Image (cartoon, rainbow, N blue to C red):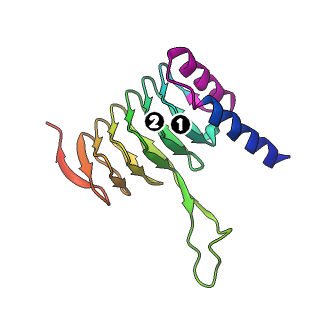
């Protein structure tokens, strides 16, 4: 029965989040997530293709913009502050598969779940990967294509794979 409910949730989310980002539809998308335990602030924008799972571990502030095809995996919890821009095809992963020591099998191994925190006024460029356990400080900018594996200091600009400090905002 649990499997049926999970697949049903995924199907409804896929259909609902394929719709355009009109204000009314964004409000309906936010209500859908709230119905499953997410805390969503005012004026969140969800472009088509956004995928959030599971919703009950998500907290979002006001005026957050989820661009086209953003994926948010919240098994380890994800907290996003206010006035945050999340670029196209970015992935925020608060959990990942744990790598077992030999001779342990990869398939069916445990999960590594750690919270992701994105503070206020952050801009995350397109095609970024934000990995489990990362905190992105207030006012930071993550350049497009970056893979963020470590904390990002407030008002810094990072980029690359893995992301490194480029400079501080002036």
The part of the chain drawn in magenta is 17-39
The residue under the point 63% across, 36% down is 14
Q: Is residue 68 left or right of residue 121?
A: right
User: What secondary structure is marked by label 1?
Assistant: loop
Residue 64 image point, x, y percent: 43, 28
Residue tagged by mark 1? 49
Quadrant in the rendering for residue 13: top right
Mark 2 → mark 1, Cα distance in angstroms: 6 Å
Name the disc covering residue 3, or none. Answer: none
Q: Is residue 150 in the magenta section?
A: no
Q: Residue furthest right?
A: 1
Quadrant in the rendering for residue 82: top left
**20 or 32, which lies in front?**
20
The residue under the point 56% across, 72% down is 99
User: What secondary structure is marked by label 2?
Assistant: loop
Residue tagged by mark 2? 68
């Amino acid at each position: 029965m649990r499997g049926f409910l999970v697949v049903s949730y995924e199907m409804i989310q896929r259909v609902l989040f394929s719709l355009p980002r009109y204000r009314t539809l964004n409000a309906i998308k936010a209500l859908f997530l709230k119905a499953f335990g997410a805390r969503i602030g005012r004026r969140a924008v969800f472009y088509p293709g956004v995928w959030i799972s599971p919703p009950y571990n998500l907290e979002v502030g006001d005026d957050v913009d989820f661009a086209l095809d953003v994926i948010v995996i919240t098994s380890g919890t994800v907290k996003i502050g206010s006035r945050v821009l999340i670029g196209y095809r970015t992935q925020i992963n608060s959990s990942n598969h744990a790598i077992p020591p030999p001779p342990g099998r990869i398939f069916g191994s445990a999960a590594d779940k750690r919270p992701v925190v994105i503070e206020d006024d952050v801009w995350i460029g397109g095609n970024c990967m934000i990995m489990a356990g990362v905190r992105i400080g207030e006012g930071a900018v993550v350049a497009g294509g970056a893979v963020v594996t470590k904390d990002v200091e407030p008002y810094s600009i990072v980029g690359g794979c893995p992301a490194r400090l480029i400079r501080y905002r002036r």
